[in-house]
């Protein structure tokens, strides 16, 4: 009875030990019932990579880091062993890159496969190794190229601040205060005259609408003006101007000739004798007309109705009787 009890106790102990080992392996990320291939990557620096850190492919975990040790006696290189499940064949030319797995800086290895390859690595092969810089390294990579720009920016900022201090001296501050006061007055004036401004804007809107409504009339007026312009362009204005200029020149010649005493017109205008003769003739003509008004029968022997004189009629009648 005691023997059977001991056997049962032994079986339970073995099962418990197996479950314990399997549980510990499971917590470590190991699977006792799966087969894995081992690969090696040589690094000059591992940046905090530890055993049991994951090995991923495109973000999917395919293995883990099982061992980290120096690769040689010089202790300048570090060999990292990777266990990858058999379901994934690693192409030749694959790179095992140490990367940051989260913002806390947890490390892991990312398997980066080449676009083209010729065959697959075998169990125990050495993979190409590379690493991604840490957070500090990445920050330095971002900051260092900006160092010169930052120095230039600081120098420019210092110059700007100096110029600003010079600009904002006591006199300029007073001018700026006065300008701000004027601006405040202008703003107040605009606020007080907002109704007038609105009225002006409405009038402008009405004028614009009126122009839009009378666009046809404006077009016709422009067309008429264009027609008038074409008509004026067709007229030989240049020739008319030339002819007028020639006429003025001839008139000037005539006036000069008269002023110089040449010709009959000049003599009539400038000679006093002709004026005197005309005046005497006019006086004599007045005497004759006065005489004619006083004794018209002396000069004209005609009947009022166009007949002959009565004496002539009487003499003619006497001659007929004889």
Image (cartoon, rainbow, N blue to C red):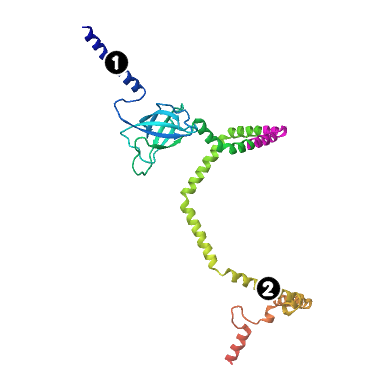
Q: In this rendering, is residue 301 above or below 204?
A: below
Q: Is residue 123 magenta?
A: no
Tell which residue pokes out farthest to the bottom in this image.
322
Q: Residue furthest top?
A: 1
Residue shown at the point (67%, 71%) measured from the top left: 248
Q: In the image shown, does 150 or 239 lie closer to the viewer?
A: 150
**Quarter of the rendering containing residue 17:** top left
The location of residue 306, given as percent across then percent down, is 59, 80
In the structure shown, which secondary structural element does the residue marked by tag 1 occupy?
helix
Query: Which residue has dot 2 on it?
Result: 249
- Position of 4 with respect to 163 (left or right) is left
Residue 103 coordinates in the image, percent (x, y): 45, 28
Residue at (79% x, 76% y) in the render: 272
- Which quadrant would residue 49 be assigned to in this image? top left
Residue assigned mark 1: 16
Above or below, 157 against 321 in this view is above
Q: Are the residues tagged 2 and 1 within 8 Å (C-beta)? A: no
Q: Along the line of sight, which residue is nearer the eye, 209 or 66?
A: 66
* Residue 132 in the figure: left or right of residue 304: left
Q: Residue at x 67, y 80 (%)?
A: 297
Q: Earlier in the sequence, mark 2 or mark 1?
A: 1
Q: Main secondary structure of the magenta part?
A: helix
- In the image: residue 264, left or right of residue 143: right
> Is 161 in the magenta?
yes
Question: Magenta region: which residues?
Answer: 156-178
């Amino acid at each position: 009875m005691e023997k059977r009890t001991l056997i049962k106790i032994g079986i339970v102990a073995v099962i418990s030990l197996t479950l314990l080992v399997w549980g510990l392996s499971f917590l470590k990320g190991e699977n006792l019932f799966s087969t894995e291939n081992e690969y090696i990557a040589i690094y000059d620096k591992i940046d905090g990579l530890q055993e049991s850190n994951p090995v991923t492919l495109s973000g999917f975990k395919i293995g883990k880091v099982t061992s980290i040790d120096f690769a040689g006696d010089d202790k300048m290189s570090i060999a990292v062993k990777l266990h990858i499940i058999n379901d994934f064949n690693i192409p030749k030319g694959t790179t095992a890159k140490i990367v940051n797995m989260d913002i806390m800086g947890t490390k892991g290895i990312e398997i980066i496969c080449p676009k083209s390859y010729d065959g697959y690595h075998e169990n125990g092969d050495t993979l190409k190794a590379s690493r991604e810089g840490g957070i500090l390294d990445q920050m330095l990579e971002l900051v260092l190229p900006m160092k010169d720009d930052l120095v230039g920016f600081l120098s420019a900022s210092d110059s700007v601040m100096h110029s600003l201090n010079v600009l904002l001296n006591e006199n300029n501050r007073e001018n700026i205060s006065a300008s701000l006061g004027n601006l405040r007055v202008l703003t107040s004036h605009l606020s007080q005259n907002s109704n007038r401004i609105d009225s002006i804007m409405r009038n402008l809107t009405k004028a614009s609408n009126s122009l839009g409504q009378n666009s046809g009339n404006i077009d016709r007026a422009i067309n008429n003006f264009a027609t008038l312009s074409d008509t004026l362009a067709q007229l030989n204005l240049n020739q008319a101007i030339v002819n007028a200029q020639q006429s003025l020149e001839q008139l000037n010649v005539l006036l000069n000739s008269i002023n110089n005493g040449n010709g009959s017109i000049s003599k009539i205008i400038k000679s006093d004798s002709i004026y005197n003769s005309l005046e005497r003739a006019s006086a004599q003509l007045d005497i004759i007309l006065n005489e004619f008004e006083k004794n018209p029968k002396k000069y004209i022997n005609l009947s009022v109705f166009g007949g002959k004189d009565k004496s002539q009629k009487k003499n003619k009648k006497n001659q007929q009787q004889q």
